Amino acid sequence: MAEQSDFEAAERLSARRTRMLPLLAILLITQQGAFFANSGGDRIVDHVKVSAWLVMSAVILLALLTGGGWIYPKRVRNLANDEATQVNRLKAIRTGFVAAMVACLALYFLTFVEQVEVREAIHIVTTAGLTAALLSFAFMERRDARGG
Amino acid sequence: MRAVAERLANRIKEKRAELGLTQAELAERVGVTRKTVNTVENGVFVPSALLALKLAEALSVPVEELFRIER
C-alpha cells in the first residue's frame, strides 16, 4: 500500500511540475521587466528585487539540475525523475545552454551599437538560458504525458 | 553507403493487453511513471537496457520478444 501511495505521489509531483514550469518562466521574465524598468536604482526595494531574482534563478537552476520536488521523500523523487524525465531534463538543459550562448553572441554584437551594462548582460543571459530550459522541459513533459 | 533509418519497435501494448494491465499498473510494476511507459510504448523514447529488461520481466516475456529493430 505504501508503494502505491509513493507511485501516486510521484505521478502527482510529475503533473504538478509540468504545470508549474511555464508559470516559473513567466514569473522570471516578469521579474526581468521590473529590473529593466527601474534599472540602476539604489533604493532598498531595488536591492530586494535583485536579491529575489538571484534567489529565484538559483532555485530554478537547482530544480533543473536535480528535478525538484525536494519536500517529497527520496523514493517519490526518484520515481518522478525516472529515465524518460531525466532525458527530457538533460535535453532542456542543453537547450538552455544554447539559448544562453546565443544571448551572449547577440549581446556581443549589440555592444557595437549600444553600451550594455555588465549586470544587464548577466540578467539577459541568465534569463534566456533558464527560460529556454524551463519551456523546453515543460514542452517535452507535456508531450510525453499526452501520449507522445 | 546510405545509412538505413532504424527504430526500436516494441510489443508492449500487445503484451500489456494480454495480461490485462493498464499503463499505470505496468509503470508501477517497473518503478517508473505512466508517462515513461507511454513514451516507450509509442516509440518516442528509447529505453536503456536496464529499463527494457525490467519491462520484459514485468510482462513475463524475453526482452528480444518485446523489442526488435525495425529497418
Image (tube, grey):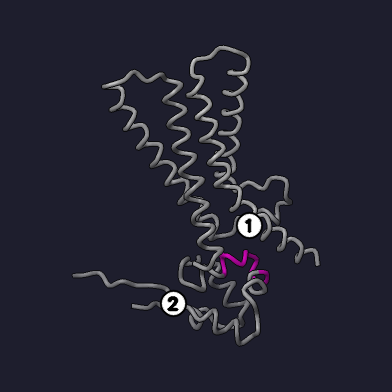
Residue B63 falls left or right of residue A1: left
Answer above or below: position of A28 versus B68.
above
Residue at the image position 60 percent from the left and 81 percent from the top: B16
Task: Please give the residue where the numbered disc 1 appears in the rendered image.
Answer: A15
Q: Position of residue B35 (x, y in %)?
A: 58, 65
Answer above or below: position of B33 versus B10.
above
Task: Please give the residue where the numbered disc 2 appears in the rendered image.
Answer: B9
Chain of the residue that carries numbered disc 1 in the rendered image: A
Frontmost residue, A112 versus B56: A112
Q: Residue furthest right?
A: A1
Query: Residue A75, labelled with which disc?
Result: none
The residue range painted magenta reads B28-37
- Quadrant, the N terminus of chain A: bottom right
Q: Position of residue A107 (x, y in %)?
A: 34, 28
Q: Amino acid at mark 1?
A: Ala
Residue A130 falls left or right of residue A102: right
Q: Amino acid at mark 2?
A: Ala
Q: Does the magenta run of residues contain B32?
A: yes
Q: Position of residue B14 (x, y in %)?
A: 54, 84
Chain of the residue that carries numbered disc 2 in the rendered image: B
Q: Are marks 1 and 2 on the same chain?
A: no
- Number of labels in the image equals 2
Q: Residue furthest top?
A: A42
Q: Within 10 angstroms of label 2, few (less than 14), some, or many (20 or more) residues?
A: some
Frontmost residue, B22 versus A112: A112
